[in-house]
Image (cartoon, rainbow, N blue to C red):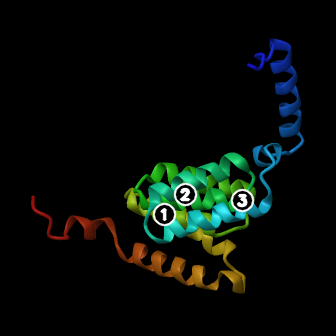
Amino acid sequence: MAQALPTEEDIDAFAARFGQHLRAGGTLAEWMGVDDADMEATYALACFFYERDEYDTALRLYGLLLMGNPYERRYAVAMGMCKQMLKQYDDAIGYYATALLMDFDDPVPSFHTAECLVQKGMRQEALETLAICLRRAQTAEHQALRTKALELQRLLQAFTPQDQASSGACA
């Protein structure tokens, strides 16, 4: 037997309950009964595809994770990394900015933002972003990132706009 379609009142009541859930800090994953173990398994699978350079597949999985829980910083960083690898630098920067809003002290999004800015030819902005990254990367936990950021900073400082003009490009 066919089930009756929901009434407008049913839809309004559902929307009110769902809205209340979201306003209370709830996520779509919680609403749908997706547990943390399933989210972690999906994240691990997305990371597997990312590490195999299958960025389009990883991107879809990270997108699902972000829909399920938009408050998880790792998902925003991972989405940014996929976008960066796909050379979608503006989108990547947007995801890194989202991750920074969730944890302003994390130097990782700033470092990757600087990498994107370099690819966009925005040397000065990249140097400014690296300075921010380096201020945040003071702990032993971030020593490897700090080393990479310092190296990129040195390279950018050594490369001046005049170097680009005299690099032997055809006129």
Q: Which residue bears the numbered disc 3?
A: 39
Residue at the image point whose x is 37% and y is 58% from the top: 121
What is the CA distance from the residue labelled 3 to the residue labelled 1?
33 Å
Res 16 seen here:
yes
Q: SS of the residue at dot 2?
A: helix
Amino acid at circle 3? Met
Does residue 32 appear left or right of residue 73 in this picture? Answer: right
Q: Which residue bears the numbered disc 1?
A: 126
Q: SS of the residue at dot 1?
A: helix
Q: Which residue bears the numbered disc 2?
A: 80
Which mark sits nearer the N-terminus, 1 or 2?
Answer: 2
Query: Where, quadrant-wise, is the N terminus in this rendering?
Result: top right
What is the CA distance from the residue labelled 1 to the residue labelled 2?
16 Å
Q: Which circle, 3 or 1, is nearer the viewer?
A: 3
Q: Residues within 10 Å of mark 1 (few under 14, many from 20)?
A: many
Amino acid at circle 2? Gly
What is the CA distance from the residue labelled 2 to the residue labelled 3?
18 Å
Query: Where, quadrant-wise, is the C terminus in this rendering?
Result: bottom left
